[in-house]
Image (cartoon, helix red, strand yellow):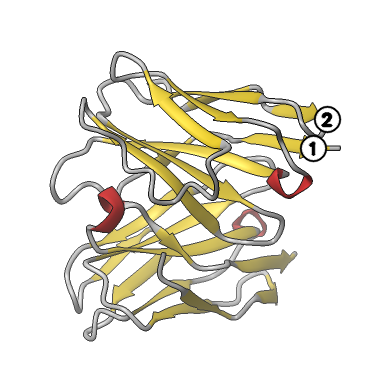
Amino acid sequence: GQQLNQSPQSMFIQEGEDVSMNCTSSSIFNTWLWYKQEPGEGPVLLIALYKAGELTSNGRLTAQFGITRKDSFLNISASIPSDVGIYFCAGQNGGSGYALNFGKGTSLLVTP
Amino acid sequence: GAGVSQSPSNKVTEKGKDVELRCDPISGHTALYWYRQSLGQGLEFLIYFQGNSAPDKSGLPSDRFSAERTGGSVSTLTIQRTQQEDSAVYLCASSKGLAGAYGEQYFGPGTRLTVT
């Protein structure tokens, strides 16, 4: 599958701060998705983006599908301790039955 | 409603033994995927099933890996003659299989496989 470069690799922030992470690819994707994974659990879908330039919010989370279709970012506003986890970006372009290509994740730690 | 379930949650096996991992997708979801997640890594696609079509096996790392899906629902991933490098979390996901919604894949909790 295609490689997605996700950054930063980890973040250590204080409660209340805003967070931004992004994902880039050398290939074009038709769909960008963001998942959150907590220890011992499977990834949980946060936001799905289907159109270049699309900006979508889910509560305190906002994600954008880059105009070039090769990147996406996720912002978390006013972080809280339960935001702790690993955030993965994933891209999909219809190949391999629409299998997802994942980044390596951004590990987020939030201190009270 | 019930989400994707997987069993067992943990499996420890000796090198060379065969293992079977099971996935029950969300009811009504026609597409089913298996992924593998090694420690500290993202998810790696293994195999995809859609309805009654032949599966897409392009992600399977070797011929020791196989999977089947019976009756368009439950799936079993089999690893023969396990090796230590097979140690990972194996995740199953399902989706509605509809155009435009393939991306909305819902994951099970995974099976943590340890090969000793």
Q: Are marks 2 and 1 on the same chain?
A: yes
Q: Which residue lies under the disc numbered 2?
A: B14
What percent of the width, then of the height, locates residue B49? Answer: 31, 34
Going by the numbered disc 1, the residue's amino acid type is Val
What percent of the width, then of the height, locates residue B4? Answer: 45, 28
The number of discs equals 2
Using the rendered view, name the quadrant where residue B96 is placed: top left
Q: Is residue B14 above or below residue B34?
A: above
Q: Quadrant of the N terminus of chain B?
A: top left
Picture disc at residue B115: 1
Local crowd size for mark 2, using a 10 Å CA cut-off: few (<14), some (14–19), many (≥20)? some
Residue in the picture at 21% in, 73% down: A54
Q: Quadrant of the C terminus of chain B?
A: top right
What percent of the width, then of the height, locates residue B74? Answer: 41, 18
Q: Nearer the viewer, residue B83 or B42?
A: B83
Q: Is residue A4 above or below residue B9?
A: below
